[in-house]
Amino acid sequence: MNPAILSEYFQYPFVRYALIVGVLISLCSALLGVLLVLKRYSYIGDGLSHVAFGAMAVSAVLKMTSQKMLIILPITVAAAILLLKRGRDAKIQGDAKLAMLSVSSLAIGYLLMNRFSASANVSADVCSTLFGSTSILTLTTGEVWLCIFLSVAVSAIYILLYPRIFAVTFDEDFARASGMNTDFYNLLIATVTAVIIVLAMNLVGSLLISALVIFPAITAMLVCHDFRSVSIFSAVVSVACAIAGMLTAIVFGTPVGSTIVACDLAVFCIVYVFSALKVGRG
């Protein structure tokens, strides 16, 4: 990439906004991804992103696009709590609930957008929402500040409650036996998950959020072997791939979300090959 071209692009506010929001979202997604992978909830990001897509369609039908967070965030948080709530006597198990919510939300969202959308190009709107092709480059100042506030809040929660989150993640039964309120921390993880999923829709779109959450965590686990190191390495990989992906997309005109995921995939493949060679030589 030519530095002169990049410096020219940085003169535009929407590029600076995109980079700020992209870095913050990728950082929070990486930290959250480590928790979800270790708790075997990797695919919940995909399910919640579909729920958020359905909620976004509802906000569009109600002509509340400027206040869409008032609808999307509560619905996604409620879905996250429902999916992460454990119940041995539940008639519908977690994987079935995830499939039902995911498919039905996606279908209803597309149905609403197709039937009630005021846009003349529904297919383009749906494609942008699902794959995040240009959403990150059209953020308003208010949306940028909201992303900054929520990202800082999520990071603060993760850092301040790190020991308890660590305990609940690795051995929930022991944590409960030691007197910890594990239901509260699972609820907290569910809420934070929903917040990050909603924010990440602007970066990579509904269908690609799982990659943003999973790839950095899995990549870090190939290199590091303790929770703290995995979290830090995952955050570094996620932020680096987000920056590289956004700059590449801006300069070469490729879809932002797909380019970021491609960068995550490339880094994972490189780390996987090197770790496999290292094991083979050992």
Image (cartoon, rainbow, N blue to C red):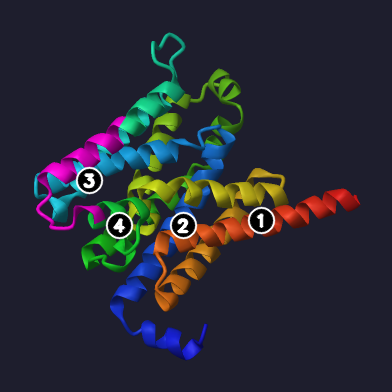
What residue is shown with label 3? 56
Q: Amino acid at mark 3?
A: Met
Q: Where residue 242 appears, x then y in whole percent?
A: 48, 63
Residue depth check, mark 4 versus mark 3: number of the one nearer the observer: 4
How far apart are the alpha carbons under marks 4 and 1?
27 Å
| Magenta part of the chain | 104-123
Callout 2: few (<14), some (14-19), or many (20+) C-alpha neighbours within 10 Å?
A: many
Q: Where residue 80 appears, x then y in whole percent?
A: 36, 33
The answer to the question of whether label 4 and label 3 lie on touching residues, with beta carbons closer than 8 A, is: no
Q: Amino acid at mark 1?
A: Cys
Q: Nearer the viewer, residue 267 or 30?
A: 267
What residue is shown with label 2? 26
What residue is shown with label 1? 269
Residue depth check, mark 2 versus mark 3: number of the one nearer the observer: 3
Residue 39, disc: none
Residue 277 magenta-highlighted: no
**SS of the residue at dot 3?**
helix
How far apart are the alpha carbons under marks 1 and 3?
34 Å
Name the residue at 58% across, 56% down: 265
Q: Amino acid at mark 2?
A: Ser
Seen from this angle, which residue lies furthest right? 282
Up the image or down, 29 lies above or below 96; here it is below
